[in-house]
Image: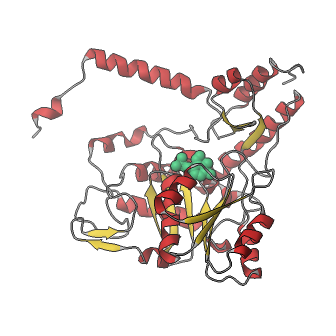
Amino acid sequence: MSTCFSEATLSDRDMARLDALYEQLCLANADSIGYPGAKDFSYVDLASFLTLPLNNIGDPFSKSTYRVDTREIEREVVSFFADLTNAPKGDWWGYVTNGGTEGNLYGLYLARELLPKGMVYFSEDSHYSVSKNLHVLGMRHVMIRSQANGEIDYDDLREAISIHRDVPPIIFANIGTTMTEARDDLAKINAILDHLAIRNRYIHADAALCGGYAAFLDPKPNYDFADGADSISISGHKFIGAPIPCGIALARKAHVSRVARAIDYIGSLDTTISGSRSGFTPLLLWYRIRSLGKRGLRARLQYSLSLAEYTQRQLQSIGIKAWRNPNALTVVFPRPSERVKQRWQLATNDEIAHVIVMPNVTREQIDNFVADIAKESSIPCNA
Ligand SMILES: Cc1ncc(COP(=O)(O)O)c(C=O)c1O
């Protein structure tokens, strides 16, 4: 039996407006190569789920009174990423977030509950949301200098921790900085803490972009639970690719037990940041990892790595000082003209810009991009 409201439809005018918006978005989407969102996906098989009021409220690992959920699927998604990040067997927990920022907030929240007097150390190249998260949580923090490639300056980190040796350190490590995809090395960070005989510590890994593929890199960066991370945040809409922002937060289970509270109203545990949570985004991530598998993800990574190398070479061939961190999909170069920035939707920061070679980017797009930049430089394009 349907209600009268279920038959409500849009007017022709509103439909036309949606059509026009869709066209406009497709155009904008076509040549955007400056932000890290993969676009090589289609989730039309999941359309029927849009007719359901899905809600994964509460903890994905505990039952809820509300059963219109995709908790089982969510558990499979987080298990997949727990496996990729070498989470300790039987001692990890995770959930699907609204994106990398929420996963970082979650990691810092756990750190604060474990080490209430802790001091957070993070590099100046960290994502802009980190300062906001620290402000929300009211945590003491010290910003650490970055090296030229965007990686944390380990000497500055050592010195800062030495000064506050009586305060437990909480390290916010970047596993792929926003602008240069630099990866802080947990082995080096742990060596500093060991050298200073600091046992009481917490390390959060912000793997917003790289978390989707770091496990497949050779050599694997030192970023995961086996390397000493206590929590990890990954964006789902970046390398994996999704039409709705989402992410994965993972943490050692013992840490999460400290914050869990049983809530009668939902018949579940309150372990997540949001109360109501999307039941649709876990389906997107599940669909993607089931259809691609580790093999597919690895193949997309190899494709992107070789096209990133090509992009760097082509830019250099027209006299642009382009560079990349080792095994990075991000090609960094001096800030171009405003026209080029707008045309290709390039993210800029002070004097630098970047292209992020996601698996959907084609060689033809790169050639067109390089030719476009060449128009403004004195060296003719030989792309
Ligand atoms: C290093 C880093 N951390 C965190 C974020 C925030 O992730 P999200 O946009 O998924 O919230 C980003 C986004 O670009 C990022 O580059």
State which quadrant residue 313 falls in: top right
Looking at the image, is 318 positioned above or below residue 272?
Answer: above
Q: At 24% from the left edge and 69% from the top edge, which residue is drawn?
A: 267
Residues 285 and 323: in front is: 323
User: Which quarter of the rendered picture does the C terminus lie within?
Assistant: top right
User: Which quarter of the rendered picture does the N terminus lie within?
Assistant: top left
Taking the image as shown, residue 317 lies to the left or right of residue 214, namely right
Q: At 48% from the left edge and 79% from the top edge, which residue is drawn?
A: 254
Q: At 47% from the left edge and 49% from the top edge, which residue is drawn?
A: 246
Looking at the image, is 303 positioned above or below residue 334?
Answer: below
Percent position (x, y) of residue 145?
74, 57
Percent position (x, y) of residue 25?
49, 25
Residues 121 and 252: in front is: 121
Q: Is residue 193 visible?
A: yes
Q: At 54% from the left edge and 44% from the top edge, which residue is drawn?
A: 241
Q: Is residue 239 visible?
A: no
